[in-house]
Amino acid sequence: QKEVEQDPGPLSVPEGAIVSLNCTYSNSAFQYFMWYRQYSRKGPELLMYTYSSGNKEDGRFTAQVDKSSKYISLFIRDSQPSDSATYLCAMDWGGGSEKLVFGKGTKLTVNP
Amino acid sequence: GAGVSQSPRYKVAKRGQDVALRCDPISGHVSLFWYQQALGQGPEFLTYFQNEAQLDKSGLPSDRFFAERPEGSVSTLKIQRTQQEDSAVYLCASSLGQLSGEQYFGPGTRLTVT
């Protein structure tokens, strides 16, 4: 079992839909949780960065962390064709290790 | 300001050749990371520098892989005697170096070994 599991999709939704992306993890030592967006042939771009359990909102994006269930989510409201990309969850232990452990990525297509 | 840059963007090597991949981090960023991303997979950690010190190289897949950052700025990832399984995108990221600071990625170098 990998430390971070993410459904690779692909996921296809109509423009304006609410998108829900999820990751589960097995290592309870993870403290910091991130979502990256990666367009084709580009590097990952940091979208959301959260510490510990709870919600964080930034525009159309909401990140949720449930440490008791070892489950994190990213919600995209009013999805746009420009949101079409691969979304990667990532996490690290904190305490100076700094190396990120990534999920496999979910490929999202938003259809106009 | 300028982000993380990597060169070359694409590299084709014949099996057995040595390659060198370069990363220019964001100015002032103390920490620098290398990741390997296979097709359809998430990035996997290779190695980590804080300034010029290589603090973690646990992800390097074999002793054919070597990384350096001699002056604490630009870094080079070298792969000796390339094999087909080395074909991947090699990503560089940098951060300010605070505990679990946000990492900013470059565009990657796509290496194809034929």
Image (spheres, rainbow, N blue to C red):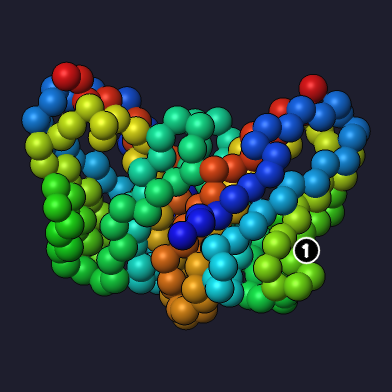
Foreground residue among B114 and A59: A59
**The furthest residue to the top:** A112
Say what amino acid the circle numbered 1 marks: Glu
Q: Chain of mark 1?
A: B
Q: What residue is shown at x 55% (from left), y 63% (from top)?
A: B26
Residue A27 coordinates in the image, percent (x, y): 41, 63
Q: Which residue is mark 1?
A: B68
Residue A35 coordinates in the image, percent (x, y): 33, 52
Number of numbered tags placed on the structure image: 1
Q: Is residue A85 left or right of residue B65?
A: left
Within the image, what quadrant is residue A76 found in?
A: top left
Secondary element type, mark 1: strand
Q: What residue is shown at x 25% (from left), y 55% (from top)?
A: A72
Residue B4 coordinates in the image, percent (x, y): 55, 55
Q: Is residue A111 above or below residue A101?
A: above
Within the image, what quadrant is residue A112 found in?
A: top left
Q: Is residue B67 left or right of residue A80?
A: right
Q: Quadrant of the C terminus of chain B?
A: top right
Q: What residue is shown at x 86% (from left), y 28% (from top)?
A: B15
**The furthest residue to the front:** B1
Residue B89 can be seen in this image: yes
Residue B29 coordinates in the image, percent (x, y): 55, 71
Foreground residue among A28 and A87: A87
Residue A97 can be seen in this image: no
Q: What residue is shown at x 22% (from left), y 27% (from top)?
A: A81
Q: Is residue A42 above or below residue B26?
A: above
**Local crowd at mark 1 within 10 Å, few (<14), some, or many (≥20)?**
some
Q: Is residue A104 above or below residue A27?
A: above
